[in-house]
Amino acid sequence: GGFRGIAAEVVWFRADRLQDEGRYAELAQLATWLTFLEPHTPEVWAFTAWNLAYNVSVMMPTHADRWRWVEAGLKLLRDDGLRLNPGDPVLYKELAWMFLLKLGGTLDEAGNYYRTEWKEMYEKGVKEGNLAALGLDKAKMDAIDAEYGKQDWSNPYACALYWSVQGLAAARKPAHRQELRQVLYQTLMLEARKDERFAQRALDEMRKAYAEHPSQMLLQIMVKFKENHGLD
């Protein structure tokens, strides 16, 4: 009702202040209130999960402590955000970026630890026959293997691909499709660094992205990528 809307505005105002002041631990607590007040606003879930995984995590003293906050951000998006906002492309995009950059990237010094933890979680899910606990659907995984090339599903890149593909299937707005296609082709480009099988698929996805949203920068990236991988 009206009171909930007013309360949400007050909390948002306070959250902005805390973020500006770098008080991320307090912000994390306050942000949980936002998910209760505005559970069907995807941006609330994206904001809260990002804060947990990127801002609060780096304040922690050990890699294990950091991972707990990163995992909390992932679970918040996957288990709660998407449950209350099924098929929302914003949440798919945030999950895909988190796997690509936070778990799969090199900017966080704890990245190797995150990848090891994720691999153990995945292998446990396979052993127990419970990949659904990680938000993964075997039929969708098989479809991605068939479309883009066999994936190492214990690698965060595969999950970035998984969530971007799901999001693209649900996205209708051009801006959402552009963002999800970017995650998709960037993931394949990174996979192609170690396995040339993915190079052609990466180029194909760049071409699809360019067809939907022409960009001089993307065109330059495609030219350079073709040169590096000997593609036509």
Image (cartoon, helix red, strand yellow):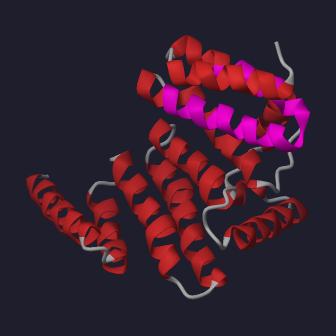
Residue depicted at 79% across the width and 33% down the height = 144
Q: Is residue 43 left or right of residue 15?
A: right
Determine the residue positioned at 51% across, 14% down.
214
- The residues colored magenta run 178-206
Q: Is residue 46 above or below residue 24?
A: above
Q: Is residue 25 magenta?
A: no
- Asked whether the viewer can see residue 192, the reply is yes
Furthest-bottom residue in this view: 61
Toward which corner of the image does residue 122 lie, by quadrant? bottom right
On the image, the x and y values in percent for residue 96 come to 60, 46
Question: For this rendering, which residue is in front, 98 or 44?
Answer: 98
Question: Which secondary structure type mostly characterizes the magenta part of the structure?
Answer: helix
Which quadrant of the rendered structure holds the C terminus? top right
Which residue is painted at 57% across and 48% down in the image?
97
Q: Answer with left or right where residue 170 lies relative to residue 184.
A: left
Where is 162 relative to 56, above or below? above
Q: x, y (%) of residue 106?
A: 67, 60
Rendered location of residue 151, percent (x, y): 85, 42
Q: Is residue 119 above or below residue 100?
A: below
* In the depicted structure, whether residue 209 falls above or below residue 84: above
Q: State which quadrant residue 78 falls in.
A: bottom right
Return the residue nearer the eye: 10 or 60: 60
Q: Is residue 196 magenta?
A: yes
- The residue that appears at 62% across and 75% down in the rendered structure is 67
The image quadrant that residue 201 belongs to is: top right
Nearest to the observer: residue 105 or residue 93:
105
Q: Is residue 149 among what the camera can see?
A: no
Give percent across and percent down for residue 179: 50, 33
Q: Is residue 223 toward the left or the right of residue 228 in the image?
A: left
